[in-house]
């Protein structure tokens, strides 16, 4: 590693948290495991406390949350964090770990199912077709615009730290997938999204973050509202050649099985 380097920034992911942090009315802050397929097959979407079984409420995840990656991608990110931290300390370089939420914006892949939620909804809406929204529509994601992420990277490079940095980078606002699909449909004056009882085995239910640490340490604040960012992205998508791709992945997870059951309600 170059001895003249002062700071090394790693693009990590919120995926290292797994389900992230929840609040149980009896046990306080908890870190529940991923929902088993048997639970999802019963259309029981919400998480419960693994200690007492009470309904648990998702809260914005903080940097000190338990790390429990649930995929190969997430495990790789956790390993990268460890390698960068060890290597930087050995070389006298300051490690900076930025855990990104769902990054979107012009220039993103339009065919990668891991990041394809907005392009997929946009394609259907442009064709005046309704989007399908899984589970009960209340899957939550924190969508952060690419320009805000770039600003965070520059800020983390420019501002010295008194101790190693590990910061969550997101909008700080949780948006349900149903709300996202509705916003995109409204932009195109397309039919309302349809909530369907499908699910992806092993999918994360609610992913959002607390960005107070990034605000305080970097004097960084996200500037892009979701609707403005979506308009910018959709304008860019309209300028791209028509691509042939089919994906129903709108939950920021890859390598998962899509399951559809008859509605038992």
Image (tube, grey):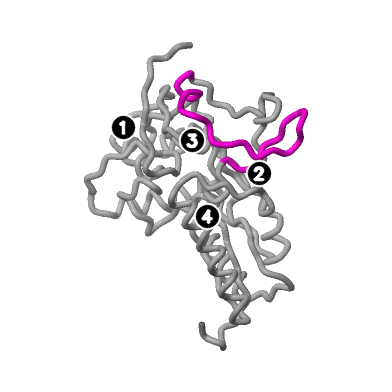
State the image coordinates of residue 62 (x, y, percent, origin top left).
Answer: 67, 50
Query: Residues under labels 4 and 2: Cα distance?
Result: 15 Å
Q: Which mark sits nearer the N-terminus, 4 or 2? A: 4
Q: Which residue is mark 1?
A: 128
Q: Which mark sits nearer the N-terminus, 1 or 4? A: 4
Secondary structure under badge 2? loop
Secondary structure under badge 4? strand
| Residue ID at (39%, 47%) | 114
State the image coordinates of residue 162 (x, y, percent, origin top left).
Answer: 74, 73
Using the image, tell me which numbered label, if any, was put on residue 177: 3
Q: Residue furthest bottom?
A: 4
Query: Residues under labels 1 and 4: Cα distance?
Result: 33 Å
Using the image, tell me which numbered label, if any, was put on residue 60: 2
Please tell me in which quadrant of the rendered image residue 257 appears.
Answer: top left
Segment tinted magenta in the rendering: 19-42
Q: Nearer the viewer, residue 10 or 89?
A: 89
Q: Which residue is mark 4?
A: 13
Decide: is 109 above or below 159.
above
Query: Residues under labels 1 and 3: Cα distance?
Result: 18 Å
Using the image, tell me which numbered label, if any, was put on residue 162: none
Disc nearest the viewer among 2 and 3: 2
Q: Which mark sits nearer the N-terminus, 3 or 4? A: 4
State the image coordinates of residue 240 (x, y, percent, origin top left).
Answer: 28, 54
Query: Residues under labels 1 and 2: Cα distance?
Result: 34 Å
Disc nearest the viewer among 1 and 4: 4
Query: Residues under labels 2 and 3: Cα distance?
Result: 16 Å
Q: Which mark sits nearer the N-terminus, 1 or 2? A: 2
């Amino acid at each position: 590693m170059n001895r003249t380097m002062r700071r090394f920034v790693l693009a990590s992911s919120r995926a290292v948290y797994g389900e992230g942090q929840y609040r149980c009315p009896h046990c306080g802050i908890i870190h529940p495991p991923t929902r088993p397929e048997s639970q999802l097959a019963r259309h029981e979407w919400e998480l419960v406390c693994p200690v007492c079984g009470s309904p648990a409420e998702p809260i914005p995840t903080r940097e000190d949350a338990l790390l429990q990656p649930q995929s190969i991608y997430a495990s790789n990110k956790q390993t990268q964090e460890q390698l960068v931290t060890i290597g930087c300390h050995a070389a006298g370089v300051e490690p900076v770990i930025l855990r990104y939420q769902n990054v979107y914006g012009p220039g993103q892949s339009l065919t990668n199912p891991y990041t394809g939620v907005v392009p997929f909804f946009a394609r259907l809406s442009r064709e005046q077709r309704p989007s399908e929204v899984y589970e009960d529509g209340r899957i939550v994601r924190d969508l952060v615009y690419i320009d805000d992420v770039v600003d965070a990277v520059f800020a983390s490079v420019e501002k010295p730290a008194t101790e190693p940095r590990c910061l969550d980078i997101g909008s700080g606002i949780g948006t349900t997938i149903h709300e996202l699909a509705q916003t995109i449909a409204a932009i195109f004056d397309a039919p309302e999204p349809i909530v369907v009882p499908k699910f992806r085995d092993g999918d994360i239910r609610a992913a959002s973050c607390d960005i107070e640490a990034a605000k305080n340490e970097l004097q960084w604040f996200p500037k892009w509202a979701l609707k403005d960012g979506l308009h910018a992205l959709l304008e860019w998508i309209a300028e791209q050649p028509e691509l042939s791709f089919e994906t129903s992945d709108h939950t920021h997870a890859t390598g998962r099985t899509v399951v559809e059951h008859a509605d038992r309600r």
